[in-house]
Image: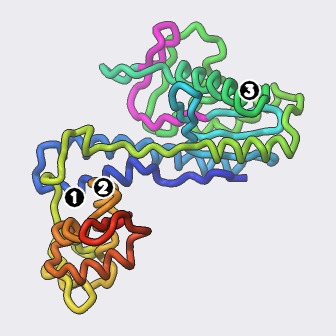
Amino acid sequence: MNIKPRVIPPDINHLEMLLQRLKPNHPVTPQLEEMLSTKLAGWNGEQSLDFHLDYLDEPHSILHNLRLYDDHHFFQIDTLILFPTFILIIEAKNMKGQIIIHREKKEMRRDLEGFQDPVEQAERQKDLLEEWLLRHMGLRVPVNFLVVFTNRRCVLEFDSSDSQIHEKVVRATSLIGAIERKKEFYQEKVLTRIDLIRVERALADAHQELVPDYTKRFNLNYSDLQKGVRCPECGKYFMKRAKEKWKCSMCSYSSYRAHEQALREYAALVSKVISNKEAQEFLKISSRHVVYRILSEYARSTVGGGKYIKYLL
C-alpha cells in the first residue's frame, strides 16, 4: 500500500520556474540547466523503481521522499518500505558509466569524479531512522537498506573486502529478489497492524518538504526575471489582458486564467505576498482595478489594509 505517493519534488518545479523566468541568455542559465538535468535524472531513476515495487507481496506499506528532522538536522530517504518484521530503506542512484565503490576508502568513483560512498550514506540513514523511531514513538524496530542503481547503462565494480556488498548494492532488476532475501532473514513479527498504521501516520506527518531558494543560492534578484504573463501555447511573454482574458500577440492563443501560473511563479521566486502595484508591474497590467479583481479572486487571504494591503498568494 502506497501511503505517501511519489510526487515531483518541489525543487524541480522551482528550478523549472526559474529557468522559464530568467531573462534570455542569462549567465547562470547553463548551471541551472545542468542542475535540473541531474535532478530530473534522479527523479526518473526513483520513478523507475515503482515498476519493480509493484511486484512486492503484501503486507507492506511504502512511503516515498521522506524528509525527517532528528532534533539536530534533516535527513532524507528516497523510499521506505514497512513490513511487519522490519523496515527497509531504498537509496536510489541513477548514474551511468563505470561506477566503482570503494568501501575501505568510503567513496564512489565514476571516471575522475568522486562521490560519497552510497553504502555509508544508507547506513547513516538507517541509524538515524532507528533513533527517530525510538525517540518519537518508543519503538525498537530493525531497519535495513538497499542501494539500488536504476540506470541500465552503468557498470558496477566493487573494490571492497565487504563480503555482504552484493546484498547491499543491487541493480533495479534484482530489487525484488534482494528484498525477498532480506525478508527471509527477519522472521519475528515486531509490528502489529496497529503499530504499522501508527508508524505510517507518524512518518507522513513528520515529513517536512524542502524547497531550496535557488534565487538566493545563485545571487539572483528581481531584475533578473522576465516580467509579464507567459503564453501556455508558444512560451513567449507576449500575452495582453483584454476583455477579461489574455491573448498572445505572438501566436493569438487566448486564455482566461494564464495569470495564475505567473502568480505561482511570483510566489515561488519573489515573495508569497504581493501588492496591487507589484502585481501591475509583474503581470504588465496598467489598470489597478483589473489587478484588484484578479488578486481578490486568486489570493488566499490579505494582510494589512487600505493602500498598504497585500495579498497572500
To which residue does mark 3 refer?
A: 134
Comes first in the chain, label 3 or label 1: 1
Label 2 – label 3 distance at C-alpha? 39 Å
Label 2 – label 1 distance at C-alpha? 14 Å
Q: State the SS at label 3.
A: helix
Residue at 33% over, 79% down: 257
Judged left or right of residue 56, residue 184 is right
Residue at 54% over, 18% down: 120
Q: Is 147 within the magenta?
A: no
Residue 66 in the image, given as x and y percentages of width and height: 57, 41
Task: Kindly indicate whether the residue at mark 3 contacts the one at mark 2 (C-beta within 8 angstroms).
Answer: no
Judged left or right of residue 174, residue 22 is left
Comes first in the chain, label 2 or label 3: 3
Q: Is residue 313 visible?
A: no
To which residue does mark 1 refer?
A: 21
* Amino acid type, mark 3: Leu
